[in-house]
Amino acid sequence: MNFSEVIVVGSGIAALQTALEAAKGKNVMIFTKSGLRTSNSYLAQGGIAVAMSPSDSIIKHEQDTLLAGRNYNNAEAVMKLVQEAPSAMNSLMIAGMEFDRDQFGNVSLGMEGAHSERRILHSHGDATGKFLIEHYLFQIQHSPVKVMEGFEVTGLIMSENNSCIGVKTVSPEGRIESYLAEHVVLSTGGCGALYRFTSNSPAATGEGLAMALKAGARIKDMEFIQFHPTLLYTHGKTNGLVSEAVRGEGAKLVTETGNKIMDGIHPLKDLAPRHIVAQTIFSYLRRGEMVYLDISMIPNFPARFPSVASLCEENGIDINGKIPIAPGNHFLMGGIETDDVGRTSVQGLYAVGEAACTGVHGANRLASNSLLEGIVFGQSTGRFIARQPVRELPKHSIEVTGQKYVHQLPSLTKLSDKLMEYAGIVRNETGLRTLLNWLESFDLLGLLKQDVSSFPIEQRLVVNGMLVAWMIAESALCRTESRGGHFRSDFPMENDKSWLHQSIVIDKNVMKNRLKGRAFDEQVKAKATT
């Protein structure tokens, strides 16, 4: 049996930061199902938020984060984030990370939506994620961390006392292999690629969330999904992200006739919080009216935003005019519930980054806080693990058996279409129940027990995706208010009295009970009509 003291699943910023810190006291292996450069972090066009200017402060950064999160945030997690941000960025720069500077050699600070000050660090304009990951990969190459590229983690190995003791993988050659570990860290990102319209890497399909659910971990706040307002939209499809920093530099959201759609909607207009901007754009699209980003006022656009310019050129869009846009899934505020050092409710299992729910983002993430979260909380999790005494693993594990494949599963395309339609930007009870009824027409209880390691890759994605979709729809149905990224057209107002301090948490027992309860209700209804 293969063994490593620490296994980190994923290759984004949180995974790399955790691995580097943990490697100071433990031997560490990173598993990534595709390549080290295939992650949402690598695609990140936005930057890193940090209070560095004389007019800024960690209190202002804290207040902006709480306001964007609709005061649903974990206040202690927010304070940890903003307090540790300046030292974390200074450490990065000392280690050789280069951020953009002005003509005087000072670090440039950009503005993004819902920020009250210019505080966004960028690298090479809108390619921050790429250069940040390259910086970390250089460190990984010169560390003792072992990297397993192309190894897909398909399940967690559990002991008889329900603790996590390792992972099950599928190698690039298709071999099913098991690796034991004292500490397993899920840094698998969110679930954006399950949606029809998304800015996410194709790898962000929510497997870590599904694996954690199967292992018995608590999953929290799955109704809170941020839809980025501006994805390039051509021929009925979204084709990549148009950074919020473009609006930060003055671009305006307009209709075909030039009407500025954010005027009169919010005091911050085009830089309003993302959920407000996304909902406004969506209302126009539903009426059949296209929305564009007018960039005519930004001088030398290709030099300022090379990634966006390249994306537009690849899709035949003239960057001297207006960019057609639509909103799509961008970030999951919920996820696997953790404490401030990444521990989940399952012994031996940790989560960091977008896969985790620390509560730092509340109901809506403040722009450019996500890379920062990966760095700050990845550092804390890695340091905590590095200091842990040797954990003696149980000698027996629970073997979960599975079929070779499952009959009558939907396609991934159909799942993504239904998620976008019924649990997307605007939700209501009718749509959410439609989605839940469709999902529950398949054997979700059976899928919850399945080891998908031997399944074809498409079926692995669908099985895990259906479990994640159920958690999103169930959570969204339960929260009868609108808050942050969760908008219910049948409950359009925030309800602080009932919901400000109440969270929706799902684990496998909750899921089993609700599925069984609904099945019983259907049986009662069927008998009543006969």
Image: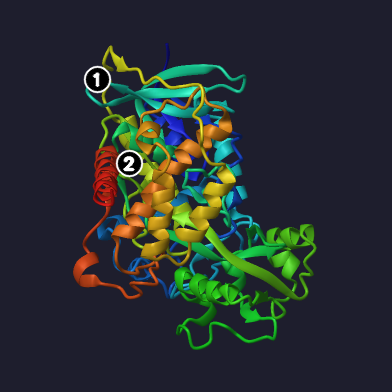
**What residue is disc 1 on?**
160
Q: Up-down: is 279 above or below 195?
A: below
Q: Are marks 1 and 2 in contact (CB under 8 Å)?
A: no
x 72%, y 62%: residue: 235
Q: Residue furthest front?
A: 530
Q: Which element type, helix, strand or loop, lies under badge 2?
A: loop
Q: Which element type, helix, strand or loop, lies under badge 1?
A: loop
Q: Camera-side residue: 207 or 46?
A: 207
Image coords of residue 270 (percent x, y): 54, 78
For residue 313, side relative to residue 286 (left or right): right
Q: Camera-side residue: 323 or 305?
A: 323
Instruction: Select label 1 or label 2 by which is in front.
Output: 1
Question: In the rendered view of the protein, which quadrant contains the N terminus?
Answer: top left
Q: Amino acid at mark 1?
A: Glu
Determine crowd level at label 2: few under 14, some 14-19, many 20+ residues with C-alpha closer than 10 A.
many
Q: Camera-side residue: 373 or 168?
A: 168
Determine crowd level at label 1: few under 14, some 14-19, many 20+ residues with C-alpha closer than 10 A.
few
Image coords of residue 356 (percent x, y): 37, 46
Asked whether residue 364 is in view, the answer is: no
x 44%, y 18%: residue: 178
**What residue is disc 2 on?**
342
Q: CA distance from mark 1 to mark 2?
A: 23 Å
For residue 324, side relative to residue 171 (left or right): right
Nearer the N terminus, badge 1 or badge 2? 1
Image coords of residue 497 (percent x, y): 19, 71
